[in-house]
Amino acid sequence: MSQKPTSAQREVVVSTYTRGIVGPGNPMLGPVADGGTIRVGTPPGCWGPMITPKFQGGHEVSQPVAVEGAQVGDAVAIHIQRMEVTSLATSSGVMAFVDGRYLGDPFVAKLCPSCGTVSPPSHIEGIGDEAVHCDVCGAEVNAFRFTNGYVIVLDKDNNVSLTVDKAAAERLAAHAKDNARLPEHSEQHSILSLARADIVGLAAHMQPFLGNIGTTPSKDLPDSHNAGDFGSFLVDAPHAYAMTQAELEQHKTDGHMDTNSVRAGAILICPVKVPGAGIYMGDMHAQQGNGEVAGHATDVSGITEVKVEVIKGLAIDGPILLQRPDDLPPMARPMNREQRAAVKALAERFGQATIEENGPITFIGTGRTLNDATHNGVDRAAKVTGLSPEEILNRATIAGSIEISRLPGVVRVTFQCPMSILDRIGVGHLVRKQYGLDAA
């Protein structure tokens, strides 16, 4: 969507959302200045929008913000400076679909089984699986069920959490919206209303991150499907957001990563596919291990603050991540002073004249399966760096890693890349600062 000329702002605060759709059809806020700050309060992703039939995507992400000077073919570095959980509790679990309550995809085209209304308005009556009712006819209308679910209470000050029993879950459900701390303009039902409590008394660490953050796709699509795996459900789908595989690959920006290292202290570099880039955020998780293997994690309300930086001429197809040093896989971590001295001695012993100056970089890959996602990540890395896919594989094997971000198909391809290449593509200064390489 074209932007009206206006003076750029040093800070843009966002408290409005897009009801499940990302793309050029959403008007942009801002623009924020290159180097400026965006602060966003986001509602939970996944389960809340999933049980709210009028949503046409699986998340409730923020209205996009234009970035001054960002043009198609550039990239935008998103420096994640702050991330805070605000929910007191949430609920999640493994999902199942209810047949007859959707057209092809229950995330996108929900259907009232009684009156036939597509994406009907709805309300909550009572507590439990059958609490969501159609405003048009009154029928129970939830297209999803838990096969195994839990309610979890959160202590952000001490970074711990605990799953609770049915009685506690029902007490939380009685004031679901308040306990979820849904933002004022959020339109979702709180998943706390279902009060499913199959796992009781399980303590877990908290480490918040954003599951969906990035730049606006060049065609409107469901926010949860802005990735190669979930996006594959749009291919030849029987609803308004159907695409061909070629269209999906052309338009998506892979903002829906569910990558647990996209957290405070990381830098996410995203493609610009519409003028102004259109930075959006959502789907904060309170915690998640490597790989969202249950299909969903602990979606929460939260506040995120980022700084943006335009990288001119860096034409990329999907995200590049500069992880926090402590999130890097061990084999990709820069060596300390003693290790570098040992490497220098090793080179002298065997007559090796040069030692490569390099830094770690992570490419996000997505696809229908983990194998497809791995090939995608490797191919993206090869295209951007100019290294061969075979060399990327070798580097990821001995000086990096390939890690699962989400089933069925999001991965991180991390490797040590020559600094001469990182400088050429315009990210060398970011890598040096992120990993303290200037002081090495």
Image (cartoon, rainbow, N blue to C red):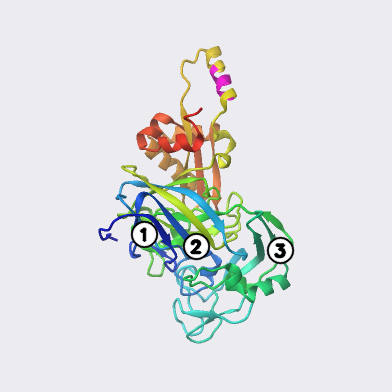
Where's the N terminus, which quadrant? bottom left
Lower sequence index among marks 3 and 2? 2
Please name the amino acid that badge 3 sits on: Ile
Image coords of residue 286 (percent x, y): 59, 57
- Residue reaching furthest bottom? 137
Res 200 → quadrant: bottom right
Mark 3 element type: loop
Which residue is the site of mark 2?
42
Element under label 2? strand
Question: Which quadrant would residue 340 be assigned to in this image?
Answer: top right
Give 214 or 438, whichever is nearer the viewer: 438
Comparing 294 with 28, the one in front is 28
Query: Is residue 227 something that shows in the picture?
Result: no
The residue at the point 47 percent across, 29 percent down is 438
Q: Which of marks 3 and 2 is in front?
A: 2
The 10 Å Cα crowd at callout 2, few under 14, some 14 to 19, many 20 or more, is: many
Tell me the residue that label 1 is attached to. Answer: 244
Q: Provide residue 257's location: percent of width, then percent of height.
A: 49, 53
For label 3, the residue is 199
Q: Where is residue 189 in the image (x, y as percent from the top left)?
A: 54, 73
Foreground: disc 3 or disc 1:
3
Query: From where the camera sits, is residue 329 visible?
Result: yes
Badge 1 amino acid: Thr
For marks 3 and 1, the one nearer the N-term is 3
Magenta region: which residues? 339-344
